[in-house]
Structures are given as structure tokens and as C-alpha cells.
Amino acid sequence: MTFKSILAASVLSFAVAGAAVAGSPVSDEVKAQATAALTAQGYEVRSVQMEDGMIEAYAIKDGKAFEVYLDAEMNIIEVKN
């Protein structure tokens, strides 16, 4: 293998790994809606993104960190801590 092919394979593997770890960005409107919905339920929202077709928010409640998954209507589907 040449240096260029090794470099290309490395860059591609890092890009794929990064995409698997990081969620997709969401619009400012969706962030605002998710933040408002979760704040009303006592969460302090740290970040909002899309993952696996759902809105995923990282939030704090009662001193504990949570991953909160919402549908398009801002209903909580799942909560992980």
C-alpha cells in the first residue's frame, strides 16, 4: 500500500467513526422547541441534536445527567441516564 492509500483509509475511518458518535445538527427552531418542552418538565438542557431519527437532548435534572429522546411533537419517548 502506498502512503496516499493508507492516509485515505485512515481519514475515511475517522470520518465514519465521528459520524457514528456525533448526532446530526438540528435547526434553531427545533432546539428552542425541545428546550422549552424539557425546561417545562424540570430539565436543564445542555445540547440538542438528531440521532436515529429522534431528537436527542442532553440534559440535567435533580443533579443527574440524562439523554432524553423526543419525537417531532416534543413528546418524550425514552430517557437514559
Image (cartoon, rainbow, N blue to C red):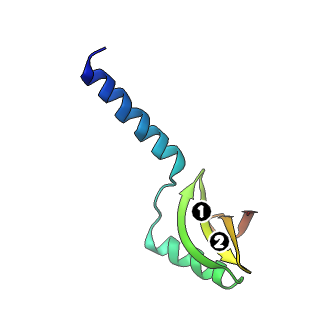
**Badge number at residue 74:** 2
Q: Quadrant of residue 78?
A: bottom right
Residue 62 screen position, x and y as percent: 74, 81
Q: Are marks 2 and 1 in contact (CB under 8 Å)?
A: yes
Quarter of the image with the N terminus is: top left
What is the three-letter code of the residue carrying label 1?
Answer: Ile
| In-front residue for pair 60/19 | 60
- In the picture provided, is 22 more to the left or to the right than 6? right
Mark 2 to mark 1 CA distance (whole Å): 8 Å
* Residue 46: x %, y % from top left: 55, 73
Secondary structure category for the residue under label 2: loop
- Taking the spot 44% from the left edge, 73% from the top edge, the residue there is 28
Q: Quadrant of residue 59?
A: bottom right
Query: What residue is drawn where x is 50% and y is 52%?
Result: 22
Q: Quarter holding the C terminus?
A: bottom right
* Position in image of residue 63 (x %, y %): 71, 78
Q: Residue 55: which numbered mark, if any?
A: 1
Mark 1 is surrounded, within 10 Å at the Cα level, by few (under 14), some (14 to 19) or many (20 or more) other residues, namely many
Q: Is residue 8 above or below residue 22?
A: above
